[in-house]
Amino acid sequence: MTTNKQTALGWVLGQTGDHKKQFVLAVALAVLGVICAVAPYFFVADIVRGIMNGIKELDYYVVRCIYIAVFWLARVLFHSFSTATSHRATFTVLGEIRKRATEKLTKMPLGTVLSQSSGSLKNTLIERIDSIETTLAHIVPEFTANLLVPLVIIVYIFTIDWRMGLASLLTVPLGLFCYVFMMKGSAGFYEKTVAATKALNNTAVEYINGIQVIKVFGKTKSSYERFVTDAVAAASSFIDWMRSSIIPFTFAMVIMPSTMVSVLPIGGLLVQGGTLDPADFVTIIILSVGVIAPIITCMSYSDDIRTMGTIIGEVRSIVDAPEMTRPLKGSVPQKNDLDLENVTFSYEDKEVLHGINMHIPEGSFVALVGPSGSGKSTIARLIASLWDVDDGSISLGETNIKDIPLEDYADKMAFVSQDNYLFNMTVRENIRIGRADATDEEVEQAAKMSGCHEFICSLENGYDTLVGSGGGHLSGGERQRISIARAMLKNAPIIILDEATAYTDPENEAIIQRSVSNLTKGKTLIVIAHRLSTVTDADTIYVVEDGMISDQGTHEELLQHGGLYAAMYAAHMAVKDGEVDVNA
């Protein structure tokens, strides 16, 4: 794995993989292109030298003019081929980087992913990875070529006259000083622009997702003002950065290529003193002019070079992020007993689970109950291997789940939470995510068993209706039932329902409970629920309180214990009785 000590450019080049030859070819073509762009200056110098030496043959000048035209044409062709080659390879590499980044998200602990906002992740996966295009497609071939050729020309000037070689370099130190001054603090400024852009993305996503709440509660003005504030802050961060560097950048761009400022007076004095041949002086003048364009091209990439480290750093924060420790290959236990032994877990250094011990036999019905925030859902996610435990262990069939390949373990689990996500696809394809090779008949059967077949048929296009982004075209209860149908279709031996009936009405809840009961025979069922009446027939009920198991047993046993469960059940039944009275 790439180490964090590797430079940004080194890391990017390390991602080129099988495409290195294409980038080498792009650099070679770019060098040839720049050479062809500079070569005409030699022929122009030759023409001037011919005039000064009194050569009158027309063929002498015509041939050199043809060479100039050929080299300019070759320069266009080489540049085009270099650009096409580098871009073809670059966009392939960017696609591979983006694929690795999205795959990495599935291998990272869920908490690490959720700690970043969707706007921030979108910014990194889209904009930041796209920004690498400049580095690979332009800086690597063009900057390299345009930096190499001026060096060759200056060396050639030194071979003509070392004094003129030094004269052609006199503006470089001052130009470099301005360039270094321009670069000073640029990393900090760019990081501020990145933070401001992320904040703007987050606000934009929040504004769009929450537009219904904003309109209903009349918060349009305040929410829009927040968006405007973040937009102004993002724009100001760029303006402040540009304002701090525009003056030194301008001086650097003016001074660095101004080779004539020193070449003309010094050369003139040397010619006047008889120590420099006039023809050589003219050649040096023309070649010095040929150095200007490549230097300006190199300097035009200054912004891209100074932002490269931050851009690559953000991409690497995902691509090189620590993964959940799982083997690629390993034995998968046949038994599906689950054991949690002294499990602890922390959110951002705050321990939320303290020494959890549970035994869930294969084929049993286990419930987790407790107040909101007690740790029930965290336990469920740890069992589903969405996070890694901090200490202790979770075993499946006496095998630590860390020793089971992630995909093999995932095949054992069907997980339904209260906020399962639906993709902007048809209802049929959303259910088929449970098992990719399921037939249409199997999809519809799962829908019938989960109590959503009738409402699906009532939709405009039935099973072929698009559900919208996040399932936005459906109600919460409808989305929930489709999620349950998806889990049923998977037919996994272990089913976890985390508040799975939170959005369902009593009638549909009864349908779902019956279908779950039918489909989970012989399977392990783990249910997290606030509605205690739905888990009274569980084999074992674990009461979770403040991140610990405070009690366990059957429904009747827990009522006899008279602890938290008895109080919660009494309150639950009082609410249900109240609902009956209201409807009476």
Image (cartoon, rainbow, N blue to C red):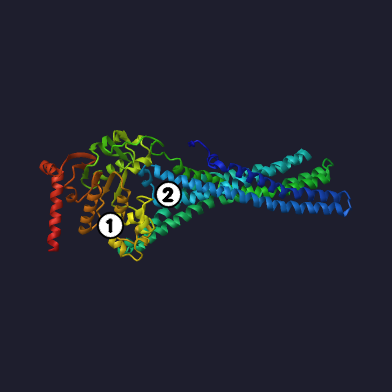
Residue 148 position by quadrant: top right
State whether residue 157 is above or below residue 486: above
Q: Nearer the viewer, residue 377 or 405?
A: 405
Residue 538 image offset from top left, x and y in percent? 18, 45
Q: Secondary structure at mark 2?
A: helix
In the rendered image, the quadrant that contains the C terminus is bottom left
Residue denoted by label 2: 121
Residue denoted by label 1: 448
Give the residue at x 79% y 40%: 160
Residue 110 image offset from top left, x and y in percent? 36, 44
Give the number of the mark in front: 2 or 1.
1
Between the C-alphas of marks 2 and 1, the distance is: 37 Å
Q: Nearer the viewer, residue 480 or 418?
A: 480
Residue type at the position of mark 1: Lys
Q: Secondary structure at mark 1?
A: helix
Residue found at the very far left of the displayed protein: 560
Residue type at the position of mark 2: Leu
State whether residue 487 is above or below residue 548: below
State whether residue 473 is above or below residue 436: below
Give the residue at x 59% y 46%: 139
